[in-house]
Amino acid sequence: VDNAAANGLSDRVSVHLDAAVAIDGEYAVVVANVLAEPLIALASPISARVAPGGRLILSGLMASQAEAVAAAYRAQGLSTPTVRRRDEWVSLELTRVG
């Protein structure tokens, strides 16, 4: 939130810290930075928020967890992810096809 404000983006960025919060709509970019197990469990509701052609960025993953998380999101109709790695940490970037 502070970073969005510092960059003049407060009116364009919405941050939700509680995964249980019901969020309506579809978005061009969705970011989730939580552990692998919650990401897998929430694959359906998180994927549903990505607009057609939109991007989903998942981070906070150990490299050994990346394939299981990617599979959960591919099963929801998202693309094979672009994987970015820093040491043992990984982020995945997927796209909603269609």
Image (cartoon, rainbow, N blue to C red):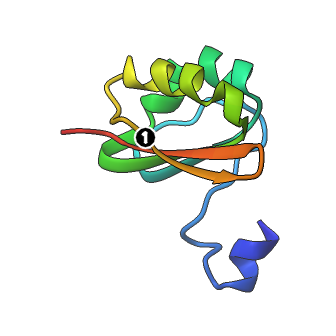
Q: Position of residue 79 (x, y in %)?
A: 33, 36
On the rendered image, what quadrant is the N terminus found in? bottom right
Instruction: Please indicate whether residue 71 sits to the left or right of residue 20 in the image.
Output: left
Q: Position of residue 12 (x, y in %)?
A: 54, 69
The relative height of residue 7 versus residue 48 in the rendered view (above or below) is below
Assess disc 1: are there few (<14), some (14-19) or many (≥20) residues with their C-alpha within 10 Å of its C-alpha: many
Residue closer to the observer: 78 or 9: 78
Helix, strand or loop at label 1? It is loop
Q: Is residue 20 visible?
A: no
Residue closer to the observer: 10 or 82: 82
The relative height of residue 24 versus residue 8 in the rendered view (above or below) is above
Q: Position of residue 43 (x, y in %)?
A: 53, 22
Q: Is residue 57 visible?
A: yes
Q: Residue furthest left?
A: 98
Instruction: Please indicate whether residue 34 sits to the left or right of residue 84 in the image.
Output: right
- Residue drawn at point x = 61 percent, y = 29 percent: 22
Asked where in the image residue 50 lies, by quadrant, the reply is: top left
- Residue drawn at point x = 77 percent, y = 51 percent: 87
- Residue drawn at point x = 42 percent, y = 29 percent: 48
Residue carrying label 1: 81
- Residue drawn at point x = 34 percent, y = 44 percent: 51
Asked where in the image residue 42 lies, by quadrant, the reply is: top right
Circle 1: residue type: Pro
On the rendered image, what quadrant is the C terminus found in? top left
Residue closer to the observer: 52 or 97: 97
Instruction: Please indicate whether residue 52 sits to the left or right of residue 4 in the image.
Output: left
